Image (tube, grey):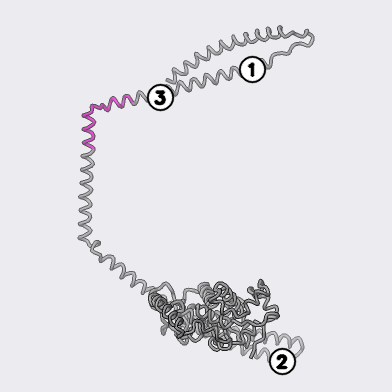
Amino acid sequence: MSAAPLNVVQFSSLPTYSGASTSRLQALYADFSRQKQSNPTSYRSNVDWWRHTLETIVSEGWQGEGYSDRLVLHASPSLADIFRYEGVGKPLSLSTVVTELCDSKAYIPLQYFLTSTQSIYDHGSLPLRIASYVLGKPLWWALQQVGIVDGDQSRSESDAQKWRKVKGDYVVVDLVEKAAEAVIARQRCGEGISLADVLYSPGSFKARFKDVLPDMPLSELDIKVLVRYLERDKRVLVMDKEVIKFVDTISTEPSQVTAVDHGVLELKTAVENLQAQVDDLQKKIDERTRNASDALRQKRKQIAVSHLRSRKQLEELLSKRLGSLTTLQSTLLSVETAIGDVEIMRSFETSTATLKSILSHPSLQREKIDETMDVMAAATADAQEVDAAIRLGGDMVQAELGVDEDELEKELEQMARDAQLEQAEAEGRRKVEDRHAEEEERLREKMAAAPATPVAEPELGRKEMSARFAALSRQHGAHRDSDTQAGSEEDRDHIREAA
């Protein structure tokens, strides 16, 4: 039975097809299995292209034949019909691609994935794999040379023979890893402080995480694969037939589903079921109210009374369910509180044992502490004696060198006075310079303010103007010398006072 091929819109939405030319598609659709030996680079490129294409087909749910799984590839000869492309045909190497992806652990047979207890990331002992490679490769090559085994048996196999070997269901590891990371992220975001938040039944787990990936609703088989991966390979949960429990990956203690977990999950399930019943009853009551109102507007009194009678019965049932829901919620809260108290007491016991172990150390015994403190006091006294001896020796050396401390103090005081005197003289010189600058500024202002030559007088020549300016300069110079002499006397008085 052949599957319907993808339509043009679906092909155009595939990232691998959008940029591929017709010649490239023809090369990808041809039988390139022989290129593994002759052109391994092209062979690997073709296999990688098909790997991305198949992952997109599986994640979009386009496998045909009624398959809705988003994490499992259903490999069969009809899979090639899905990729039938106008002008190119259908691919001839899909069976080779599936075989290659299985060898590289990108695809894992479904039955093996669900039943194996060994992690898919554990490929066995490294020394054993190295030994098998080193010893097996030369032996296989020798058998090929003498013709006992075929060097490349797949070359002589037909496409139908290859499909008989690879036909089956395969878990797509990349898609499972993506879904698992999304589940862990959602659980961490919605995780509270109670035990009930980490407990799920298979049904509630599916309801919680079936839409964890956008536009990828997970099927029953997908959920089964995902739970197995989270339990065995990621080790973020433990489970039995009825309970799925998320665990702390940091804790070193082995985790398992306990009787307490079963009891808490039953209470949680009962609360969720009652809450769903309460919500449904409320919707029915609202519906009866609307129907009664509509009947009254239509003058259908008996029908309105019937709706009101039904609403009354539903309200009584809702009251009973709300009472039961309150009781169950209180019970669940009490159970979670008791479990929290047990964890707190266990932490107290652990911390107490740790503290006792530390205090029992020989270094913290009373006799050892007294002995240590006595030794410390003796060492401190010895250090003080050494310091005093060094100081006394230094004083004796200075006395032998004839250094007079009083004379050094007097010399230091004289140096300080000289420094103050130099500072005062510098300040006096600065003031004198400032005064001279002010006098020169006033002289320039007086010269600028001198009266202009009357218009009626005849214009003076160059010689007459020079003589008059020289006379005026001598007059102002005499005044400035007298003022400068007086200022100098005052400056010397200021300097003597500062000294």
What residue is rendered at 66% in x and 71% in y?
19
Which amino acid, by three-letter code, is at mark 2?
Ile
Task: Identify residue for label 3.
Answer: 419
Q: Earlier in the sequence, mark 2 or mark 3?
A: 2
Q: Which residues are magenta?
A: 391-411
Q: Residue 448 falls in which quadrant of the image?
A: top right
Side of 128 relative to 31 (left or right): left
Q: Which mark is residue 444?
A: 1
Task: Identify residue for label 2.
Answer: 303
- Mark 3 is surrounded, within 10 Å at the Cα level, by few (under 14), some (14 to 19) or many (20 or more) other residues, namely few
Q: In x, y percent, where is residue 431?
A: 52, 21
Side of 381 relative to 429 (left or right): left
Cα distance between the residues tagged 1 and 2: 118 Å
Q: In x, y percent, where is residue 285?
A: 64, 85
Q: Earlier in the sequence, mark 1 or mark 3?
A: 3
Q: Please tell me whether residue 404 belongs to the stretch shown in magenta.
A: yes
Q: Is residue 25 visible?
A: yes
Q: Main secondary structure of the magenta part?
A: helix
